[in-house]
Amino acid sequence: MIRDHKDGSLIPYSLEGILSEVPEILRFGFNLDSITFQNPIDSSSVTPDMWQRLASIIYKNYEKYDGFVILHGTDTMAYTASALSFMLDGLSKPVILTGSQLPINMLRTDAKENLISSIEIAASQKDGKALVPEVCIYFEFKLYRGNRTVKRSAEHFNAFESPNYPPLAESGIEIKYNYNYIRKCNSCELNIFTDIENNVVVFKIFPGMNENVVKSIFTIPDLKGVVMETYGSGNAPNDEWFLKIISDAISRGIVVINVSQCISGTVDMERYNTGAALGKVGVISGRDITTEAALTKLMVLLGKYKDPAKVASLFQKDLAGEISL
């Protein structure tokens, strides 16, 4: 995005314009190509259709390039990174998402460093293999696994964090890679999954929930999945009416995932009775997965498989480094 000097509003910017602001990128000597959406949008307008377009572009051009950098608005960057990590299975090349808090045409912008380092990381190899064969977010000197990342600030340059997994790399005078935390790809073959089920909802529990309101959520027509944000380590009210609504939904084939409202930590539904009650009615533990990753993982799995039991089983597996087992 750039700041419109006429009215001060933020408007989308083409890649050509961005490169004119950061000509030093050419000093890398890399062969850079660009693909720009015909009508760039604010990231708050991102939809699963755009995830499908991005995944398809990468898949169709996979053999042509050593890595890919996606310039993306910060508001939904963690959602897109998470979705792509599940849609692009068997990656052996980097897919780096980055952006900025300040528009690239502003004096104190953080866009230049983010873009330059992202390109360097996307091109980095050792013995002919990519150093980071993952979908990642690079922001403010740190490289994170995309499906472990959340946006933490609307105004600070360090806008993102990975609360339950260490950074994959940190940049200073040099870029230092934390190789022990990077997923290995020995003989990967890329597969793409673009069918996405968006009849899902994120439901955040809160004190004083009304029975009729909760019931209206779990009985939404054609609903296929619910990501339920609970308290602490996966706790929720154990009122009979609440558990019955969830149990009835699961019996109708709706997959219900339990994630914590806390920024860090993990769901452990055996720790307290209130959590155990959810497990008894069939709620699936999301462990330490982020809400963004839980939602997009559920959308991809529901798009790929029609059997709720299959989806529930696969959700509990680590598919792209999104959960700790």
Image (tube, rainbow, N blue to C red):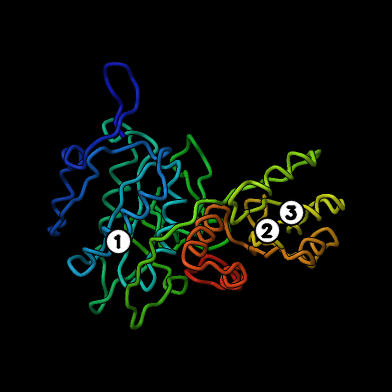
Q: Residue at x 33, y 59 (%)?
A: 55
- Residue nearest the observer in this picture, 234 or 214: 214
Q: Quadrant of the N terminus?
A: top left
Percent from the top left, x then y, of residue 6?
Answer: 27, 16
Mark 3, mark 1: which one is toward the viewer? 3
Please give the name of the residue rendered at 83% of the width and 62% of the height, measured from the top-left corner: 272
Dot 2 or dot 1, earlier in sequence: 1
Image vertical order of residue 105 relative to residue 286, above or below: above
> How many numbered marks does the figure carry?
3
- The three-letter code of the residue at mark 2 reads Asn
Separation (CA) of disc 2 from disc 3: 11 Å
Amino acid carrying label 3: it is Gly
Question: Which residue is disc 2 drawn over?
Answer: 258
- Verify CB contact (< 8 Å) between mark 2 and mark 1: no
Find disc 1 in the rendering and name its residue: 121
Q: Which amino acid lies under the numbered mark 1 shown in the image of this protein?
A: Ile
Q: How far apart, in angstroms, are the residues tagged by discs 3 and 1?
A: 36 Å
Image vertical order of residue 210 relative to residue 62, above or below: above
Residue 29: x and y in percent read 12, 58
Name the front one of labels 2 and 3: 2
Mark 2–mark 1 Cα distance, whole angstroms, equals 34 Å
Q: Nearer the viewer, mark 2 or mark 1?
A: 2
Badge 2 element? strand
Residue 196 lies left or right of residue 248; in this view the side is left
Left or right of 169, for residue 220 = right
Q: Quadrant of residue 317?
A: bottom right
Q: Nearer the viewer, residue 28 or 214?
A: 214
User: What residue is disc 3 on?
Assistant: 232
Residue 139 in picture, x, y percent from top left: 40, 49
